[in-house]
Amino acid sequence: MSAHQHEARPGASISLTALAQGASLRPGESVWAALETDLDERLRFGKGAVLLTNERILAFQGDEKKWQSRDLLPGLALQHTDHAGVGTLQLRDASERLAVWRFTLGRNPAALALLAQFEHLMQQLDLPPQKRQPLPAEPQEDAPEAEDEKPPSTWTLFRLWRFARPYKSRLLAGFVLTLAATAATLVPPYLTMPLMDKVLIPFQNGQAIDAGYVAMLLTGLLGSALLAWALGWSRTYILSVVSERMGADLRTTTYDHLLRLSLEYFGSRRTGDLMARIGSDTDRINTFLSLHLLDFATDVLMMLMTAAILFSIDPKLALVTLAPLPVIAWLIHTVRDRLRTGFEKMARVWAEVTNVLADTIPGIRVVKAFAQEGRESERFRTANRHNFIANDRLNRLWSLFTPTVTLLTEIGLLIVWAFGIWQVSRHAITVGVLTAFVAYIGRFYTRLDSMSRIVSVTQKAATGTRRIFEILDHVSSVPEAKNPVPLDNVQGRIEVRHAAMRYGNRSVIRDLSLTIEPGEMVGLVGHSGSGKSTLVNLICRFYDVTEGAILVDGVDLRQVRVADYRRHIGLVLQEPFLFFGTVAENIAYGKPEATREEIVAAARAAHAHEFILRLPQGYDSLVGERGQGLSGGERQRLSIARALLINPRILILDEATASVDTETEREIQKALDNLVKGRTTIAIAHRLSTLNKADRLIVMDKGQKVEEGAHDELMARRGHYWRLYQAQARQEKAERERMLAGADHAHLAAVLATDAPPDTFPNPPQEAAQ
């Protein structure tokens, strides 16, 4: 490309202007797409940029920003590839490569957009440059999913009705009891009017007290109090029972839905955040349902019924009584909007605290190994500081709001006293009426003050509800079949047809086709990032292919129920995961109904029976969290026993012996020999020598199958597999020489010199060895 100096085009958008600093455009020339590159040709970090205009491609690499350009002519082609975290764009003509630009895959969406514009532009080369039109801009499909920052509305709480519906009869009974209890509490102030006007005031004027009448009024007061107590207890118990069951249903439903989501969902979520949603958020909702919602309903009923009674006694005094109500309602509405924003932020910062705990406690061995206690303590201190800062901001608002509402209610009560005394002086009302009004208005404003306090917990519950429904609304990327095909009598024939798979911006599998026959053992080999583990994940249907299909016994996996299919798969991972519980419970995890005889038989086949008997309680010995009480080899043999117990037709071995020593590898290999018999087996191995029993090897590179065949056949081809094998042989030889050179004892050196790896491949052909 010829080098030219340019200046930035005036009027370009901010992002394009930043990239095009120093590059001047021709008259009528416009930028269609731009890419910021961050790697040079030797894969070192460095600044660069590629601009596509309606006439040419402009590019620079390095801090000097010496722009190069090439006019767009027929025969030019732009090729895009990505591999192992690096994306590449190559500009070629019919005979040679003209330019290459490399970038990390965070820039891949921009590269794909530039490629699309380039291909669209090449179709318009017969038009004058000024008449060429770019493709319309589209949102990036691969952009990470952003969490909705909009504060939750109180109406979100109505979505909880789906959990209340099963208990609607109890809720109706609770509402009726609430109505009756509220009515009963409004009786005493009404009885104070005759008590004042017909008993106490006449007595002060010299009239005798009618003992029977007084007894009747006092009996009414006592009866209404007892009735209110009984009704209040009944409604509280019924609604508390309902709310507890709703909370339990909410937690269970959320957890069940979470388990049905694909691995893709968990890859973009923090463990601590999910724990906070199912734990503290559901507790917050449950507290609101069991306590505050009941109080809110009581408050509303009390205010409505009180207002009705006040207007029935004296409309003028009632209007004066309710005068501060609009101001308080406006204040509540204003504060509510700020509170819901604040509580949303509080939920996020609390999730930060939980995330630190979820990261640190399971990884405490790594923290201590690298002496990073101080760093993790500072992380927690920072997250905790963010938490109390968010709380402080909210408390400042709340501390002002609550006394303000109290002040307004006191002012309202003062207005009632003033207006009431004036009405009494005019003989418009009696002292008994004023006394009843004061009693009722006291209850009215007490309930209004209580309602204002409920605003806080309501917004907390609304925030928790939205966070819960963000999980429940998420649709799994591995959906269940609408009309599932039954999968009985599985033989284990696996067929991959033109499969493709992307992780976000990365294309990991490309147009892959292969067939594995029932009972065949196939080894997957290739460099790290070649797509081996992704292919296994697709076969297990942890992810779905973006193109093509995967079939088992001729049936597309997407037409089969996920649980039905996975019952036929045994998985042995490089890092086996054990649950807190007994050894027997961990072995029987995939088949909880297994008898002790079946568990012991599986352990014997996995060569685990002997070390299990050496444990304090044998098969009933507790395994620490994640199997911390066992060695790596012991954990691996337990995972093999777990896979043996379910007797799968398809077996996946993902680096099953990669992280153990030679002696332990021998024991694990013996267990694996028992495991693979008669099963369709797909094995990924770091050490190629562990695949000597494979019927066939599949060599993968950049998400594609590049070679296939037996070991000797592949070695004779001197291709990808031969280079992998030679490189690993040299590495192992160098490691053995270093171990021998560093041995302090002669007998140790002798042992190492004669200790060959188990079950190695036959020697390579003579030409390959040379």
Image (cartoon, rainbow, N blue to C red):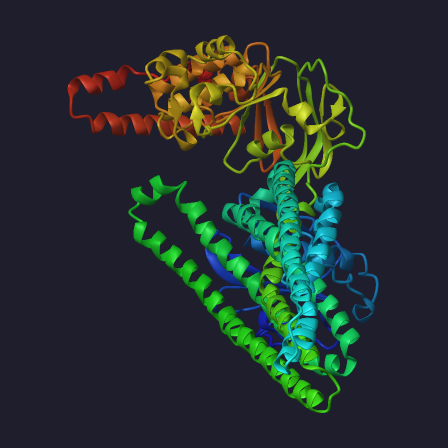
Q: Quadrant of residue 247?
A: top right
Q: Quadrant of residue 622?
A: top left
Q: Would you place residue 624 above or below residue 79 in this image?
A: above
For the N terminus, the quadrant is bottom right
Q: Residue at x 45, y 45 (%)?
A: 358
Q: Would you place residue 8 above or below residue 241 in this image?
A: below
State the image coordinates of residue 743 (x, y, percent, origin top left). 19, 26
Q: Residue at x 48, y 27 (%)?
A: 655
Front residue of 288/124: it is 288
For the C terminus, the quadrant is top left
Of all residues, the one furthest to the left in this rendering is 745
Front residue of 595/717: it is 595
State the image coordinates of residue 257 (x, y, percent, origin top left). 65, 39
Q: Is residue 708 left or right of residue 175?
A: left
State the image coordinates of residue 348 (x, y, percent, origin top left). 53, 58
Q: Is residue 152 visible?
A: no
Q: Is residue 15 left or right of residue 689?
A: right
Q: Is residue 65 visible?
A: yes
State the image coordinates of residue 33 (x, y, percent, origin top left). 68, 63
Q: How many numbered discs sit on the rendered protein?
A: 0
